[in-house]
């Protein structure tokens, strides 16, 4: 590329397209949004990626907010986000869909999606998005529940805390049992109690919390 050229890499331009569409729609620049989406659509369908197709459907929903097509696009976007396990993008789509439903005077349906959005944003500490989803939820007449206090090793017994640290070091249940003179069954019992106390589901989540 020649010095001083302002050309943007096509892949970067494609990745940025959904965000450009969202910004253009908010500013009422429909033509700009349509142009940004056209190239992204071709790329998304060429790759067949569920995550990209989900973004395509979300953009089409935003561009068709005044007719019935939006509902179908939002629903398909949510389905594809779940298939591709793109949690934060799923939360954004739930927020946009909930906002659309609220404005369409469907507060009950809106609350379901907005609650999901708040929950996901909180999990990922996306504070700005959490506040935005919470504001939309309050606009439906719903109260936003306070975020539960973070849990830590302080909630565990000394032995449970010791076992947790060993898990973080990569020790197996058998290795933990040998080091603490316990049976593997007892270690497994302690781990289940640890998961319950900390609101976790796996050793991976436990290790992530304690690092």
Image (cartoon, rainbow, N blue to C red):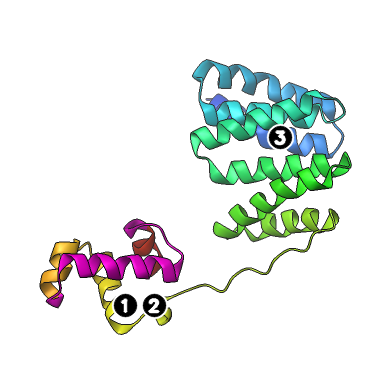
Residue 133 screen position, x and y as percent = 73, 54
Left or right of 161 in this view: 176: left
Left or right of 138 in this view: 146: left
Mark 2 is surrounded, within 10 Å at the Cα level, by few (under 14), some (14 to 19) or many (20 or more) other residues, namely some
Q: Which residue is mark 3?
A: 20
The residue range painted magenta reads: 180-204
How far apart are the two marked residues, 3 and 1, measured between alpha carbons?
47 Å
- Label 1 secondary element: helix
Q: Are marks 3 and 1 in contact (CB under 8 Å)?
A: no
Q: Which residue is mark 2?
A: 153
Residue 83 in sight in this render: yes
Rendered residue at 12%/76% (across/down): 181
- Label 3 secondary element: helix
Q: Main secondary structure of the magenta part?
A: helix
Q: Report the front residue among 75 and 185.
A: 185
Q: Quadrant of the C terminus?
A: bottom left
Left or right of 161 in this view: 186: left
Q: Which residue is mark 1?
A: 161
Left or right of 84 in this view: 24: right
- Which of the two discs, 2 and 1, labels the residue nearer the N terminus? 2
């Amino acid at each position: 590329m020649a010095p001083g050229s302002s050309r943007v890499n096509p892949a970067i331009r494609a990745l940025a397209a959904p965000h450009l569409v969202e910004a253009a729609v908010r500013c009422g620049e429909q033509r700009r949004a349509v142009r940004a989406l056209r190239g992204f659509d071709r790329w998304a369908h060429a790759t067949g990626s569920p995550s990209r197709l989900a973004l395509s459907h979300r953009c089409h929903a935003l561009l068709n907010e005044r007719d019935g097509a939006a509902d179908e696009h939002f629903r398909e976007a949510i389905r594809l986000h779940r298939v591709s396990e793109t949690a934060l993008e799923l939360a954004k789509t739930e927020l946009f869909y909930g906002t659309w439903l609220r404005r369409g005077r469907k507060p009950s349906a809106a609350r379901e999606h907005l609650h999901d959005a708040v929950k996901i944003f909180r999990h990922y500490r996306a504070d700005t998005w959490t506040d935005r989803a919470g504001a939309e939820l309050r606009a439906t007449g719903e109260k936003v529940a306070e975020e539960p206090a973070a849990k830590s090793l302080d909630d565990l017994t000394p032995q449970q805390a010791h076992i947790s640290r060993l898990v973080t070091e990569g020790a197996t249940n058998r290795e933990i049992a040998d080091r603490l003179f316990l049976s593997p069954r007892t270690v497994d019992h302690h781990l289940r109690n640890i998961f319950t106390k900390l609101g976790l589901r796996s050793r991976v989540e436990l290790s992530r919390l304690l690092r």
